[in-house]
Image (cartoon, rainbow, N blue to C red):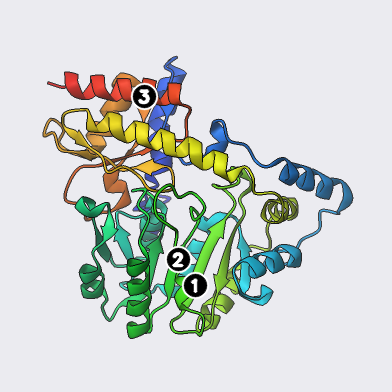
Amino acid sequence: MLKITDNVASLESPIRDVVLKAAELEKKGRKIIYLNIGDPALYDFDMPQQAKEAGARAMMDKKPIYPTSEGIIELRSAIAKRENSVAENVQVTNGISEGMIFLFSCLLNTGENILMPSPSYSQYVGMSKLWRGEDNYYSCDEQAGWIPDMDDVRKKVNKKTKAILLINPNNPTGAVYPRNIVKEFCDIAAENKLPLISDEIYEKIVYEGKFVSPKEFAKNGEFPLIVTNGFSKTYASPGMRVGYFVFYPGTEVLRDGVAKLLRLRLSMNIYAQYAALAELEGPQNHIPGMISKLKKRGEFVARRLNEIPGLSCVPPKGAFYVFPKISSNKWKNDRDFVYELLEQKGVLTVFGSGFSPVLKEKYFRIVYLAQEEILEKAMNGIEEFVRNKK
């Protein structure tokens, strides 16, 4: 009898898995409002025109050869300039997710751990399980705006910890971490001689406060730092699948390990890389308008959720997610809440337990990229669903 490995059998991808049920309903003629996935291009955001033209021009002018496994030198050089590094320390990946799978595979043996936030990006939860990693999560304090509990971060570092993960601005909570918190992460990494992995994909999407990168505190190699970023969110081009990793001093062995896996998968799409280069080097004047729209939409969603008895929501300060709490006891767990909401109202969200196996309360994640009229319809559906639950 055919069987898949235990490593794969235990995997979940909640953001994608919930779509399976939505697809069943659509086949029956139901209309679904998709608030489950952070894809700006689904709504009124678009890839910059110069990037479209650069990708098309590359298709016309350049042969479809295999590019170097680490990425084309033009893009790596541009990223290095932006990130205060050198091209040899930059690796271009099929989105951040591919690179993170490779990085986790270089870091984790069975039973070891990467110290991650609770809640965390759900894909990272799955990646840790793929390599039989030990669950190890530091708490983020909802009452403090989902800011990490730094005492808990210190307590959770143990002999099996191989790296510390920072997601700022945060997915799924929309939190933006203040300077002193980022600095303390750097201090803990330095004290324990651990790599700090900084996911900065939402760095430009900040409404309140200021984005602070660990790069500010690693100018002289004080601790091993890996920064990851990409083009899916700010440039509304997730389908291009272009992310990157920058390896700073002290992480060379990981850089070289990931490079082996990059060579094993051969290469990235060459034309997408030229489009990404145009995004990086071209006009950035679309960003203020994007932020203005998202700030308004985030405020609207948080306000509406906080008006519903049995729900509460911390207003976001960045990214484009909220992570409301289900305080009502009418649902046994957050999976039931999400699937019942989908079945009854056609609003697709993601259950909060998919973002952390150690959350003690019920939550769900909403993406608020959609236009106001769509969000209003979704909020009306959620309010009716909660108020009418017996």
Question: Contact, CB < 8 Å: mark 1 with mark 2?
Answer: yes
Viewer-closest of 199 and 92: 199
Q: Which residue is mark 1?
A: 215
Residue 201 position in % (x across, y down): 50, 55
Say whether residue 106 is visible: no
Question: Which amino acid type is shown beneath numbered disc 2?
Answer: Ser
Q: Secondary structure at mark 2?
A: strand
Seen as rendered, the residue at the extreme right is 61
Which amino acid, by three-letter code, is at mark 1? Lys
Q: Is residue 28 left or right of residue 42?
A: left
Dividing the picture into quadrants, the one containing residue 340 is top left
The tag on residue 198 is 2
Q: Position of residue 179 (x, y in %)?
A: 37, 66
- Which kind of residue does numbered mark 3 sit on? Ala
In front: label 1 or label 3: 1
Residue identified by numbered label 3 = 378
Calculate the distance from the C-alpha at mark 1 to the C-alpha at mark 3.
39 Å
Q: Residues within 10 Å of mark 1 (few under 14, many from 20)?
A: some
